[in-house]
Image: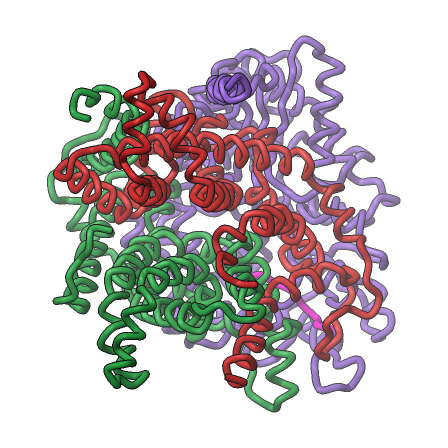
Chain colours: A green, B purple, C red
Amino acid sequence: MTRLRPQVVALLTPYLLGAFLLIALPAGISFFISFTRFNGIDRPLFIGWQNFQLLRRDPLFWVAITNSILFITLAIPLRVLGALGLALLYSRPRRAVGFYRTAAYLPTIIPDTAYALTWLWILNPLYGPINDALRLLGLPAPAWLADSAWSLPALVFISLFQIGEGFVILLAGLRHIPAEVNDAARVDGAGRRQIFTSITMPLLSPWLVLLSVRDVALSFQSTFTPAFIMTRGGPYYSTFFTPLFIYESAFDGLRFGQAAAAMLMVFLATLLLVALVYFIFEGQGFDED
Amino acid sequence: MKTRLLVFIVLIATLVLSACQPAGGSISFMVFGDPAELAAYQKLVDSFSQAHPQIQVELIQVPGQSDYRKRLSADLTAGDPADVLLINYRRFAGFANIGALEPLGAYLEKSSLITEADLYPEAVNAFKWQGELTCMPQNMPSLVVYYNKDLFDSASVPYPAADWVWDDFLFAARALTKDVDHDGVTDQFGVGIEPSLIRLAPFIWQSNGVIVDDDSNPSTLTLDLPEDLIAAEFFVSLQTVHHVVPNADEEASEDSESRFINGRLAMFFNSRRGVPTYRESAVFDWDVAALPQKDVPAGILHADAYCLPSASKNKPDAWTFIEYANSAEGQTIIAASGRTVPSLISVANSPAFLDPNAKPANSRVFLDTIPTIHALPIHPNWAEIEESASEEIMRAFYGEASVDDAMLRAVQLSREIFFEK
Amino acid sequence: MKIKGLLSIALSGLFLLPLLWMISASLRSPGLIPSRGLEILPEAPTLASYARVFEILPFGRYLFNSLFISISGVLLTLLTASLAGFGMSLLGKRARFRLLILSGILQMIPVTAVWLTRFLLFAWLGITNSRLSLLAPALMGSSPLFVLLFYWTFRRVDRSVFETAQLDGASLFQVWLRIAVPLARPALMAVGMLSFLFYWNDFITPLLYLRSQTLYTLPIGLLQLQEMDKTNWPLLMAASTMMTLPAVLVFSFLQRSLLWWDSE
């Protein structure tokens, strides 16, 4: 096969070239711009660490980072657990399991903008269905997205409905556990819980890691559309996330240098959180496939 | 095999074709607004095309006002902005400051259709940057109170008088806030007003307060002065004490302007912008009144202007359009839609604007209050100042912070933003 | 077992609610105060809001644009991702490992970190405000995940299948076209669906790049509607329903490969 190297390389060229142009190169440019003052029109002016110092003093930046990290801490574990629960519930062939799986995946299909507008309606304080139901049951009906205490939790809640991709990944993971392994364990007298903790979980952990890592990286940008459409970062900055901060720095303030510095911080934060995920799943080996 | 090759070729062709940027008209005109406003601009474009058939104008609608600024910034960065822009005087300085706008003063001097003397000086001054006229003022509305005459009638409240004061206003507001079907929920509100800096400003000026320390070179907001606080307390009390405006939940469920259009809100504070929509959708009898007064009569300017980006690739045609739009003919067309208070003195005093048969019958109000209009300071970072201050005002308005705390915080934040320049 | 059954039904109902509420709200009469009770279907359902969407915006144009971008995006993605996945599956162990790590890293870089500089790059290349700016990710298979999906599929195929074809004198490209692709049907369907949704949903890219209204896609259209009439819920829900429908259709055609592989 090695003499076919040139042909193989040709097959890989669009991917590698694309990855370079669309990700590596912009990331590199981003790194350099973060050390300049650049308004997008004039030439960038080198200013060293100033952007980072300005960011450090900027309360809005810290609000944005805090909100993003808060969101990730709340949403990721719940989403991964939710996806795991669904996968376990629906892994065996049963009557109508196809229908159940489809229903579980359905909210993920709804386009982001339509999804955001729909929840804006559903969580409407006076007229939306959820508060209607709460009032009928005599329960308090908070203002959700119009209340700075409830808005971020509301966004976390909304994200829990769109766990279709995680669900499918874990389903695939469960499929890879041969039935014989479970059967053999049962023959050996292992109870259901034991099978779960000693066999299923360890075999699933690479998938869980994959899912968590992917979710962490995605969460830094998946909050843009909901926050933009539903609350514009309000009320009073309670849903002001890092992507929104970056977008507004660049296009409202024409401060590309600072926006790039913030982007660098986001990347570092992602690395940190991913390392944390690995640490949590430590010792569970990482299979190539 | 053949079909797959065909698909492949089609794909490549698609890619190549999609790289082409669309062939717009010879110039593009970027606006924002709701459908009725857009219809007015479309009429202007159509009429222009008849007068100048060789110039094609592409009308571009941007989703909303705050998106407009970001879209423009992105386009400027890409070196590809629309040729004719519509920018508010509170927003244009940021772009003028980075040299993105072509100063139109020189073009105006050479024009045979219009001269500077034909325009209201207040509007012209609002668009001077470093002494030079940068954009062509299109309109000069101020803030007024739109009121639902039917609701006033059924509550037997007299219409707002030309010289009514804050107490009169509050009285009417309270009388017009009702729980119509007695289910414990307010169905009709007396007032709708956006908790923002530009809505609060006239109240401050009327109390003899000031917004900034130095109009020509501001370095801080002054919302924590005693006179300013008096105005802010009154403003905020409309919600927190008197409940004549919807609270946060109610506003999120159905915004004040919708309530007004649907006949469930008696008095709505707005500039001239709402007129085309109200003409089309309001099924009740309505009119406008001047702002209620206090110690000093004061109103607030809301002027917009046509601007020409220096990166435009077709400046002569763009100027021809701007000139036409600002001529008596162009301004009459837009005025007829109700959208503007024309910046041309002649058109503003013509039936196109003043016709009492076209609502609001009392359009005179916009002209009568011109002498007492104040303009906000012109500063490149003003948009951010407004946003940051408005967040604090909103917090106090919906009862999440005291007025003193909110105003103090707004002042502190403003110093950072002004300093950034 | 009964518990599982009941739980499944309850969960399914829960997941279906957002869509149901979207449709139900779209059928209300605009302008009236919505009734305060809980209702699945409004009292006097009307399609007036659907018509109004088309009155206010060139929604048909937006629909066309979204379809064009999505379908082109899918075709291009299937092409580049399967090529790359195939190529990767043929490499030697070390090269494969390196590329896997690379793909993993690429997958992890949040788009937020490259948005703006990608914008600057595209601005410099002069392709902002064009369809190409929206389709650009398709050049690299749209997402490393898609490449990996194909990679895993081809790894499962016995090498000898490819090798025999090559001994017969076929070039790698022909092997890919004639043999590999037909073997990857499930992956094609999965990636097809996922990439369709990727482009159909894309909000940030058109927001950033598009200026000409003739190019606007549905997400921008929805934003326009929201800016024009913020609390006209029937209107917004009507537009949302229209935007969701094609996605649901695509999903229903292709979801079998993803979800129904083993049920009756």
Foreground residue, A266 or B302? Answer: A266
Foreground residue, A171 or B46? Answer: A171
Residue B373: x and y in percent read 58, 48
| Residue B70 in sight from this viewpoint | no
Q: Is residue B352 left or right of residue A33?
A: right
Name above or below for residue A26 compared with residue B207: above
Q: Name the residue at 20% across, 33% down.
A: C91
Residue C201: x and y in percent read 51, 46
Q: Name the residue at 53% across, 36% down.
A: C70
| Residue A212 in sight from this viewpoint | yes
Q: Is residue A220 left or right of residue B353?
A: left
Looking at the image, which residue sits at the far bottom?
Answer: A138
Residue C216: x and y in percent read 57, 35
Residue C43 in the magenta stretch? The answer is no
Residue B193 in the magenta stretch? The answer is yes
Over which residues does the magenta segment extend? B188-194
Q: Name the residue at 48% across, 77% down.
A: B399
Q: Is residue A255 left or right of residue B101?
A: left
Looking at the image, which residue sits at the far top?
Answer: B54
Q: Quadrant of residue B247?
A: bottom right
Q: Quadrant of residue A13?
A: top left
